Amino acid sequence: MATTKKAGHRRWAPKGGKAPGGHRGDIMSPTTRSRVMSRIRGKNTSPERAIAPRLLDWNTRFEQHVSELPGRPDFVFRETMLAVFVDGDFWHGWRFPLWEHKLSEMWRAKIAATRTRDRRNFAKLRRRGWKVLRIWEHQVERDPERCVEIIRVAAEHRSPNPKRRRSKL
């Protein structure tokens, strides 16, 4: 299996120290940057496309991108009140304190605001009785089957139908 080099925000210093390097400025022209950024989507992302068919194989009912719920969860299981977010490592700031120093102030503020909004939306959902589950992009890349299993176990644990619950091992 060939290994691919991951983006800079995924390389870590030993023992949780900050990632090496600093902000180098944008290497693209404003026109090129605009074109690249316009292609980034909030729906039907690669990690979501990896998860959705596996959830369909599980033969359960779910909805995607439910707009009336805070944060528009990527997958919603109404029966069990489970909201699943499949979040990008960069855009949602996975381990952000370790690599935020490598960003320009604009990006630092944008990702910090996204993280704040995520916390606020998760809290709103929990206050309404929803279980919130976050799956990170790198988890889906590493093992999408495991991610679906995590979702399935969470949904079955909250199932109002005792026959759908798995027995404890």
Image (tube, rainbow, N blue to C red):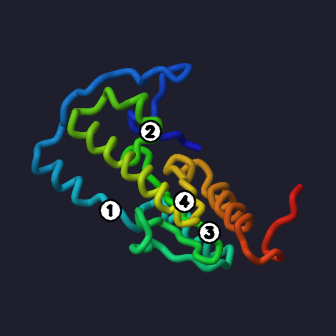
**Quadrant in which the N terminus is drawn:** top right
Residue type, numbered disc 3 = Arg
Q: Which comes sooner in the sequence, label 2 or label 1?
A: 2
Q: Which comes sooner in the sequence, label 3 or label 1?
A: 1
Q: Quadrant location of residue 9?
A: top left
Q: What secondary structure is marked by label 1?
A: loop
Residue bearing the label numbered 4: 126
Q: Quadrant location of residue 152?
A: bottom right
**Quadrant in which the C terminus is drawn:** bottom right
Say left or right for 131 vs 68: right
User: Toward the viewer: 34 or 98?
Assistant: 98
159 versus 15 height, above or below: below
Residue bearing the label numbered 3: 54
Give the CA separation, mark 4 to mark 2.
Answer: 33 Å
Q: Within 10 Å of the Cα at label 2, are there few (<14), some (14-19), or many (20+) other Cα atoms?
A: few
The reply to whether the C-beta atoms of the residues labelled 3 and 1 are less than 8 Å apart is no
Of marks 4 and 3, the one in the foreground: 4
Q: Which comes sooner in the sequence, label 4 or label 2?
A: 2
Identify the residue at image location x=11%, y=46%.
30
Of marks 2 and 1, the one in the foreground: 1
Q: What secondary structure is marked by label 4?
A: helix
Residue bearing the label numbered 2: 6
Give the CA separation, mark 2 to mark 3.
Answer: 25 Å
The reply to whether the C-beta atoms of the residues labelled 2 and 3 are less than 8 Å apart is no
Q: Which comes sooner in the sequence, label 1 or label 4?
A: 1
Residue bearing the label numbered 1: 41
Q: Quadrant location of residue 35?
A: bottom left
Residue type, numbered disc 4 = Arg
Identify the residue at image location x=40%, y=47%.
92
Of marks 2 and 3, the one in the foreground: 3
Give the CA separation, mark 4 to mark 3.
Answer: 26 Å
